Amino acid sequence: MAGFDLVALVGGDKVAWDGFVRAHARLILAAARSLARDEAEAEDLAQDVFVRLCKDDFRLLKTYDPARASLSTWLTIVARSTARDALRRKRAPQLTLEDAPEPALAVDPVEPAEKLAIPEGLLSPRQKEVLDMLYERDMDVAEIAASLGVDPQTVRSMHHKALVKLRAHFGPERG
């Protein structure tokens, strides 16, 4: 890791962390400057990057793989990504429920005028069962997976494949 002991660094060694920060602060600040409005914002963004690198017991820093990219390339990508995320959060209007007028929050329950008739044989029995559990019985993916004795990703996959078949069959001419 460019002269740094990754084990010591992610192990919380203060000397290793201080050396890492000194060695890479300019690079991270430069990446943050490219997105910031001013120097103060760039410094805040650079700080966010360092916080992200050591957050959750250095989880992100532990993902660095020198076989995939140089440390400077990886840090630049992490810095720009973190800075973009922070800027989106800061610049996005922060609306609360109290800001919205009450009639805007009201939603009239809407039932479909007619239930969609799915042609026989279009979906597998398991796909029909997953759709029924999701939309008719209002079960979540984890509940369905437990009920069927399969992995939650299998439920998501069956759901996705069923929707793809339905979209292909009913196509854009219906709506």
Image: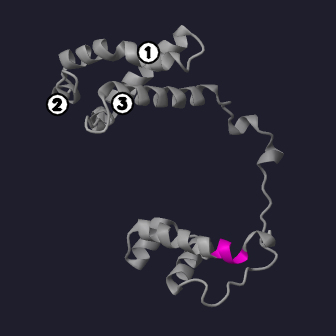
| Residue 153 position by quadrant | bottom left
x, y percent for residue 57: 28, 33
**Marks 2 and 3 close (CB-CB < 8 Å):** no
Up the image or down, 124 lies above or below 17; here it is below
If the image is split into quadrants, where does the C terminus sit? bottom right
Q: Does the magenta stretch mainly form a helix, a strand or a loop?
A: helix
Q: Is residue 164 left or right of residue 63?
A: right
Residue 66 in percent (x, y) is at 26, 34
Q: Which residue is mark 3?
A: 74
User: Pointer 2: residues within 10 angstroms few (<14), some, or many (20+)?
Assistant: few
Q: Is residue 76 magenta?
A: no
Q: Where 166 sits versus 119, above or below? A: above
Q: Which residues are magenta?
A: 166-170
Depth check, front residue: 170 or 135: 170
Judging by the rendered image, the residue that carries numbered circle 1 is: 29
Residue, x 52% and y 86% (percent of image)?
A: 125
> Image point 54% across, 68% down: which residue?
160
Instruction: Give the secondary structure at mark 2.
Output: helix
Distance in Å between CA atoms under marks 2 and 3? 18 Å
Q: Nearer the viewer, mark 1 or mark 3?
A: 3
Quarter the N terminus occupies: top left
Q: Quadrant of residue 107?
A: bottom right
- Label 2, on which residue? 7
